[in-house]
Image (cartoon, rainbow, N blue to C red):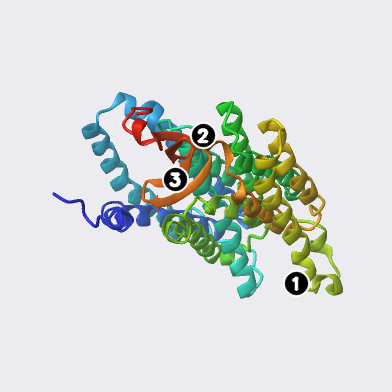
Amino acid sequence: ASAPWPNWPTSWLLAQLAVNVGPAFFALALTTPLLQRWFAASADARARDPYFLYAASNVGSFVALLGYPLFLEMHWPLREQASLWRAAFFAMPGFVLACGALVKRGSIAPSSIASPPATIVEWPRRLRWAWFAAAPSSLLLGVTTFITTDVASMPLLWVGPLALYLLTFVLVFARRQFVSVSWLSRALPIGALALAFQMCAGLSEPAWLVLGLHLAVFLLAALLGHARLAADRPAPEQLTEFYLWMSLGGVLGGLFNSLLAPLLFRTVAEYPLALLAACWLRLGAESHATPANARRPPASELLWPTLLAVLTGALAAWLPKNSALPAQAQTLVIFGAPLLLCFLLVDTPRRFALGLGAVFLGATFYTGGFGRTLHVERNFFGVTRMTLSPNGEARQIVHGRTIHGRQFLDPARAAEPLTF
């Protein structure tokens, strides 16, 4: 039998998730803002800032994410697991109703302190909440796709980025702050430049170092986005609206990667785009700019990025064909010099993000170790390229950093087996 919706399996997968998982997930997700809103209306001294409960919620998600494959799945068969989930799901409303009963009976008395009138949340602030949540969400999917195709193909490798994503919520919404937005704003550009060099140059060894670099930069970027989100949290009266816009931003970031990006891009371009968006969230000199400086003409904003794109593209297209330098030295010249120039823009997050994007754009002219790209296709399973080998003797099928097929151009050797 033919597969359902063979032309776009994403639609089929979304429909299955919506029917089989959607209602339960929706019901469970609603409990977090509901319980926090009840707690905010209580007389507890901590109720003035109930957002630490969101950190506790993500601690539970973090423990469950790691505990399921490492403990639960190893000790119980699927039938017993289903019974456990069913019992827990039906018990959960009982605990929620018990919390409501405590409020109603006065065990948790309403606060006797008059609350100040709720401030009106303006639309720019709502959109800012969505933006702070969308960038880390998109980056989560981007880094997961990249490391599972270009770095290593390992079972449960996707757990690492998701665990770090949950951990960032725990850190930024905790009552005690462990990281500051200003420190993250200074650290992220350094990591982003190192990551851009690795991605543009196509470096893949040692795999543990490349994987660690991607996860470290993702952690910095997600922490920055979520820290700015937590720093801008409103009074408890707007708690539910805050979570609504934060959730909407996370959904939009995920939909961009899973639905729009495969239609818009032939490569995993959404990953560097999400990295640029995270760099744009930094605090820099432009945050304190005077109105005159804030109205800088667009032409001056685009001058440096344009020069960086031209420089990177020219070096990438010319140097490999006309230089006797070793490959490692060539990549240092092609990408190292533009990225160092990009660092000069670090005090202005907007210009730095545009400059970094310009280097990524210029890097598309670099053929890399797989040779010149002849054809690119992207489908539900990833990006596949057909390349001409560097010595010009064969065509290759490349998926990520793996060569899945090679054939000699010489008709006399075309049937000679070369790879699996």
Q: Name the residue under label 2.
A: 151
Label 3 element class: strand
Q: Residue furthest left?
A: 1
Residue under the image location 17 percent in, 51 percent down? 2
Quote the CA–CA distance across marks 2 and 3.
Answer: 16 Å
Label 1 element class: helix
Quote the CA–CA distance across marks 3 and 1.
Answer: 36 Å
Q: In which quarter of the image is the C terminus?
A: top left
Front residue of this view, candidates 407 and 65:
407
Label 2 element class: helix
Q: Where is residue 302 in the image (x, y as percent from the top left)?
A: 74, 65
The residue under label 3 is which amino acid type?
Arg
Front residue of this view, candidates 388 and 105:
388
* Numbered disc in front, either 3 or 1: 3
Residue under the image location 77 percent in, 66 percent down? 301
- Say whether disc 2 or disc 1 marks the residue closer to the N-terminus: 2
Q: Is residue 417 left or right of residue 49?
A: left
Q: Quadrant of residue 334?
A: top right
Q: Mark 3 points at which residue?
A: 385
Q: In which quarter of the image is residue 410?
A: top left
Q: Residues within 10 Å of mark 3 (few under 14, many from 20)?
A: many
Q: In this view, does 394 lie to the left or right of 41?
A: left
Q: In this view, does 299 lie above or below 151?
A: below
Q: Position of residue 91 (x, y in %)?
A: 31, 45
Q: In this view, does 50 lie to the left or right of 258?
A: right
The residue under label 2 is which amino acid type?
Val
- Say whether disc 2 or disc 3 marks the residue closer to the N-terminus: 2
The residue under label 1 is which amino acid type?
Pro
